[in-house]
Image (cartoon, coloured by chain):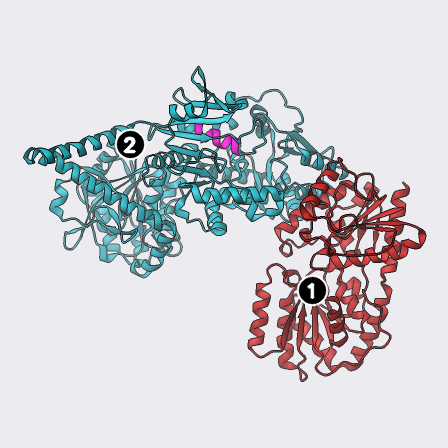
Chain colours: A red, B cyan
């Protein structure tokens, strides 16, 4: 079987979905290679056309083709229009294509597997731009027509989908699987002790959905009540409507609070932050999956997460949960975690165990099974 | 009834009493009138005074003090006469004041606002004989000495008049939304006059109509002067400055003309000749003013059928209506593709249809058909103004005044809805229009705001004409045979081409949810629009969702089939994310359908209070609203009644007059 994998997102500044696409591509190749399958990676996919070629997931091996990696945007767009119109074949002519960038183009004879990361554009309209929504809803509509199978990144995302299309998965007979993410890094063998200045950490692009406001308000209260007064480090690219958050950060800074915005950091720096931080805060209003939580767990970092979206599912009881609209609860949780060393140790252990519940190999196997089943019929 | 006096009252019982007495004494039986007092949150004493008044005087009570504009507007809404007489309660009419203004109205049918002469109540000096602009567009009262006024004619034009006492055409006043309540006790009258001017009305002063105004008694004006002035200049600054210059020129010309007439006997022959020349020029100008302005209308981008969406009925409607107007005549030279000749047969015999055939032009005027090359066309019908409903035009020339329609700024507001090439094309188009056009037409205030937001275009360069409905679409005549593909009544109806910003995906998802939740038989859903690839995609989507029985695609409908649909549909659902105007809303109001519409883009401006509003981003909210409207007859009745009210704000005649006025003024190089 020849498996096409959409890695278009990985060529831009990476968000959670892009990391998912990247890791899934790698894991799929690792899992399916011994069985003799072949792979085609698409760095330009459907309407997702990257401006600058040459970036994105790069895999080696004679069984991996990357036909569009170096294709410039204008010819790439023209080529995809030809493909969609049925006038040109899909390069590599795979049997199945895993679409993980929200796009669902026509892929000729191949079967399309559509990854649903989240339904935020409909469940929480205020947390997605109109531009995102117009694209996502158009492509989801196309997926409903074209996809031979669906991959949901979490049970919560599947429930969101069912909320809009009740019973449709069953009545239409489309197969689907739940295939969550996992930490990119192996679980650490020994957890290093954290210093008294180890910071609180927040990971995720700065946009309204991530609810930085809650973390900042909670942190300000924490700072007045705590003896240790650990700093707060915020990591993530500048998303849309991030001005308010940046304003809030500079306001706290001007009051002398140790809040630091690191911007977008690359992989190695992020790993370093996970190793040195005290705990992760994830107060999002909604997540489709919530990768940072598992990554933190795998590096021996406890997490406090919001009780919305997929987070309770991913935390699986191994972290603390608080409502995202109650900063006071967050302050209490932060102080509790800081003052109760036994609790922290317990959470670190639970986190390590929870991280081990997820693995990219497992996810890739699930997706591979789905791919096999749709190509059989 | 001839006149409705609308008098906002905020305390000042004595003045109000004097004002009412002067109406009784000097208007009395001569003029058929009514008096409407608006209690603008007055104190107890005033309130009890108002309660004891003659029951023939209507009193509208506002709970709290809302200022002159809102008070006047609420009074005007209940008025019934042809003319509103806006009146401050500290004004006293003198004998014949209203009769004189009415006689000016009779002699000048285009007069929309008529002011008069106002004297200070204490000193008896002139406070107001019109408003002029000074210091680059700042409005001030004209205050000539009293004896000079006597030499003036009974009526003369002005750029603006005060609303302390003036007549305003009621129908227009209410349609245009009345006085702008963003101003507080000042400037709203000048704003109103400039809007009247835009709509093609004349502003007149009745020099024989005199009232007394206790100016110092009006409270709460000075406090807001600065804020009002800033708002006014932001909105009108450049235009009022241009009017100031134009008015000065006009007055100088009148002065020279009058002097040439009176002095010609005493001058030397040389000077006499010069004066004769001036007079002849002036007469020639006047003669030219009565000639129609030649307008080239560039419709080469108009396609046969429905591919252009709502813009075709809109442009045709405006052209048809303008062709029937009597004032400021225009002669249209319409440039089109050959296939569209038949569609334009409604033009008058003086107008010319020029169809492009292989680089040459085939002109049709009445029954006469000619063939000419581009140079001959330009020579035969020399253009005085170019009208471009599709943005840029190949016929633009540096010295040819140009009026262009920009329907929406979709490519900036929601670029994801368009292919990248289209975004680039439109951006280029917009930049050129903004650089070249003399006047930019939009379809609502929202469009003017977007142009200002994205491109920094000053609102003074723009004007809007609402897309009012042609009556033919909603004719009461009997429906023709059943057009194909129309579901049984009642059904939800969404007419829109299948463009991404029309949001069909959300509607399908919402409808899926509605069908699954509703008890009993769900209303079907009818989607019409130009058949294209995306329609086929949506049809596949419908089938994949298992909605084939419920959702009907009918393609582009011809007019008579459309009429049938309007008569049979149960409700309009309009979840579009972005519109320049949203014509179907008005069509539905006109057809007596309840409307469910997206609270987005321009739609709140068009729909007012008459729609069941939905969040177009949330299928759950839409599904709930569909169910509510389908299941609640009382809600539908309420929406229909509100729609009937709302549709009164849109008059094709009014909007066409406005466009006509701008085209005419541009051709004559005047300030509209």
Q: Residue furthest left?
A: B266
Q: In this view, does A167 lie to the left or right of B469?
A: right
Residue A259, position as x, y percentages in the image? 63, 75
Which image quadrant for residue B112?
Answer: top left
The one nearer the camera, B211 or B497, is B497
At 38% from the left and 49% from the top, the residue drawn is: B180
User: How many residues crowd around disc 2 within 10 Å: few (fewer than 14), some, or many (20 or more)?
Assistant: few
- Whether pointer 1 and pointer 2 mark residues with C-beta atoms closer than 8 Å, the reply is no
Q: Is residue B455 left or right of residue B246?
A: right
Q: Indicate the chain on which mark 2 is placed.
A: B
- Which quadrant would the N terminus of chain B be assigned to in this image? top left
Q: Which residue lies furthest to the bottom in this view?
A: A227
Which image quadrant for residue A304?
Answer: bottom right
Which numbered circle lies on residue B183? none
Q: Give the range drawn in magenta.
A: B311-320
At 35% from the left and 51% from the top, the residue drawn is: B237
For label 1, the residue is A204
Which element type, helix, strand or loop, lies under badge 1?
loop
Viewer-nearest of discs 1 and 2: 1
Q: Is residue B474 left or right of residue A284?
A: left
Confirm whether residue B524 shows in the render: no
The one nearer the camera, A209 or A234, is A234
Residue A248, position as x, y percentages in the image? 58, 69
For label 2, the residue is B109
Residue B349, position as x, y percentages in the image? 40, 19
- Which quadrant would the C terminus of chain B be assigned to in this image? top left
Confirm whether residue A195 shows in the render: yes
- Does the magenta portion include A95? no
């Amino acid at each position: 079987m020849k498996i096409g994998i959409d890695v278009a997102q990985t060529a831009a500044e990476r968000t959670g979905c892009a990391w998912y696409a990247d890791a899934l591509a790698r894991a799929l190749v690792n899992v399916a290679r011994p069985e003799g399958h072949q792979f085609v990676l698409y760095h330009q996919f459907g309407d997702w056309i990257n401006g600058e070629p040459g970036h994105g997931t790069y895999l080696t091996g004679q069984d991996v083709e990357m036909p569009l990696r170096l294709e410039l945007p204008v010819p790439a767009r023209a080529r995809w229009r030809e493909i969609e119109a049925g006038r040109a074949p899909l390069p590599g002519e795979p049997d199945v294509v895993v679409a993980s960038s929200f796009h669902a183009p026509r892929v000729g004879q191949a079967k399309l597997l559509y990854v649903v990361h989240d339904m935020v554009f409909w469940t929480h309209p205020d947390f997605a731009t109109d531009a995102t929504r117009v694209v996502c809803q158009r492509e989801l509509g196309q997926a409903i027509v074209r996809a031979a199978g669906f991959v949901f990144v979490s049970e919560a995302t599947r429930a969101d989908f069912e909320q809009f299309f009740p019973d449709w998965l069953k009545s239409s007979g489309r197969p689907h699987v739940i295939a969550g993410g996992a930490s990119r890094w192996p679980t650490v063998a020994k957890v290093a002790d954290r210093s008294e200045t180890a910071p609180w950490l927040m990971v995720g692009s700065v946009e309204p959905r991530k609810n930085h406001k809650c973390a900042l308000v909670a942190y300000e209260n924490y700072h007045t009540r705590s003896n240790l007064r650990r700093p707060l480090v915020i990591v993530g690219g500048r998303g849309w409507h991030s001005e308010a958050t940046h304003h809030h950060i500079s306001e706290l800074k001007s009051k002398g609070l140790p809040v630091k915005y690191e911007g977008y950091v690359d992989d190695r720096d992020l790993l370093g932050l996970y190793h040195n931080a005290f705990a992760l805060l994830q107060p999002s209003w909604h997540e489709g999956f919530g990768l940072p939580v598992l990554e933190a767990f795998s590096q021996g970092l406890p997490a406090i997460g919001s009780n919305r979206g997929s987070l309770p599912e991913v935390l699986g009881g191994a972290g603390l949960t608080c409502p995202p609209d109650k900063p006071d609860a967050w302050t209490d949780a932060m102080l509790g975690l800081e003052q109760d060393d036994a609790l922290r140790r317990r959470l670190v252990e639970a986190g390590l165990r929870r991280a081990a519940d997820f693995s990219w190999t497992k996810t890739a196997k699930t997706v591979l099974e789905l791919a096999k089943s749709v190509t059989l019929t | 009834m001839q006149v409705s006096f609308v008098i906002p009252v905020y305390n000042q019982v004595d003045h109000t009493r004097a004002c009412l007495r002067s109406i009784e004494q000097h208007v009395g039986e001569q003029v058929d009138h009514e008096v409407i007092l608006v209690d603008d949150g007055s104190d107890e004493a005033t309130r009890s005074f108002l309660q004891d008044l003659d029951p023939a005087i209507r009193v509208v009570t506002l709970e709290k003090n809302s200022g002159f504009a809102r008070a006047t507007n609420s009074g005007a809404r209940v008025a019934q006469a042809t003319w509103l007489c806006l009146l401050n309660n500290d004004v006293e009419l003198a004998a014949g004041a209203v009769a004189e203004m009415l006689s000016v109205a009779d002699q000048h049918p285009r007069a929309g606002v008529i002011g008069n002469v106002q004297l200070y109540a204490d000193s008896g000096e002139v406070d107001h004989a019109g408003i002029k602009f000074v210091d680059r567009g700042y409005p001030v009262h004209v205050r000539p000495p009293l004896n000079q006024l006597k030499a003036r004619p009974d009526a003369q034009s002005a750029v603006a008049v005060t609303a302390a006492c003036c007549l305003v055409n009621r129908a227009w006043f209410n349609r245009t939304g009345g006085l702008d309540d963003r101003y507080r006790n000042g400037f709203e009258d000048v704003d109103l006059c400039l809007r009247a001017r835009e709509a093609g009305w004349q502003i007149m002063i009745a020099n024989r109509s005199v009232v007394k105004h206790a100016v110092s008694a009006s409270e709460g004006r000075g406090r807001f002067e600065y804020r009002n002035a800033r708002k006014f200049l932001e909105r009108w600054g450049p235009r009022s400055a241009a009017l100031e210059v134009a008015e000065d020129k006009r007055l100088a010309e009148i002065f020279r003309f009058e002097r040439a007439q009176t002095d010609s006997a005493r001058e030397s022959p040389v000077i006499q000749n010069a004066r004769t020349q001036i007079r002849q020029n002036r007469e020639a100008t006047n003669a030219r003013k009565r000639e129609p302005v030649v307008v080239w209308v560039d419709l080469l981008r108009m396609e046969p059928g429905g591919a252009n969406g709502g813009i075709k009925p809109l442009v045709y409607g405006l052209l048809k209506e303008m062709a029937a107007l009597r004032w400021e005549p225009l002669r249209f030279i319409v440039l089109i593709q050959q296939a569209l000749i038949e569609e334009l047969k409604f033009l008058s015999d003086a107008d010319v249809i020029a169809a492009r055939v292989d680089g040459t032009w085939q002109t049709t005027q009445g029954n006469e058909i000619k063939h000419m090359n581009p140079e001959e066309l330009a020579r035969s019908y020399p253009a005085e103004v170019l009208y471009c409903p599709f943005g840029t035009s190949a016929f633009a020339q540096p010295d040819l005044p140009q009026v262009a329609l920009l329907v929406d700024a979709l490519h900036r507001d929601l670029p994801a809805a368009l292919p990248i090439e289209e975004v680039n094309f439109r951006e280029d188009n917009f930049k050129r229009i903004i650089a070249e056009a003399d006047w930019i037409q939009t379809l609502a205030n929202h469009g003017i705001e977007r142009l200002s937001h994205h491109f920094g275009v000053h609102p003074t360069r723009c004007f809007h004409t609402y897309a009012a409905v042609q009556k033919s679409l909603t004719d009461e005549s009997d429906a023709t045979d059943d057009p194909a593909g129309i579901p049984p009544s009642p059904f939800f109806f969404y007419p829109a081409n299948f463009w991404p910003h029309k949001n069909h995906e959300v509607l399908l998802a919402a409808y899926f949810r509605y069908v699954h939740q509703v008890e009993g038989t769900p209303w079907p859903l009818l989607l019409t629009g130009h058949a294209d690839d995306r329609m086929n995609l949506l049809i596949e989507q419908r089938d994949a969702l298992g909605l084939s029985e419920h959702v009907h695609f009918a393609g582009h409908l011809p007019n008579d089939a459309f009429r049938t649909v309007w008569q049979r549909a149960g409700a309009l659902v309009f979840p579009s994310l972005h519109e320049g105007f949203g014509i179907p809303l008005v069509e539905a109001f006109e057809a007596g359908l309840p409307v469910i519409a997206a609270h987005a883009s321009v739609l709140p401006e068009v729909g007012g209070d008459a729609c069941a509003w939905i969040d177009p981003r949330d299928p759950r909210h839409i599904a709930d609203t569909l169910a509510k409207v389908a299941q609640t007859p009382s809600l539908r009745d309420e929406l229909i009644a509100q729609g009937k009210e709302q549709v009164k704000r849109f008059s094709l005649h009014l909007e066409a007059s406005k466009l006509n006025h701008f085209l005419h003024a541009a051709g004559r190089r005047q300030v509209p």
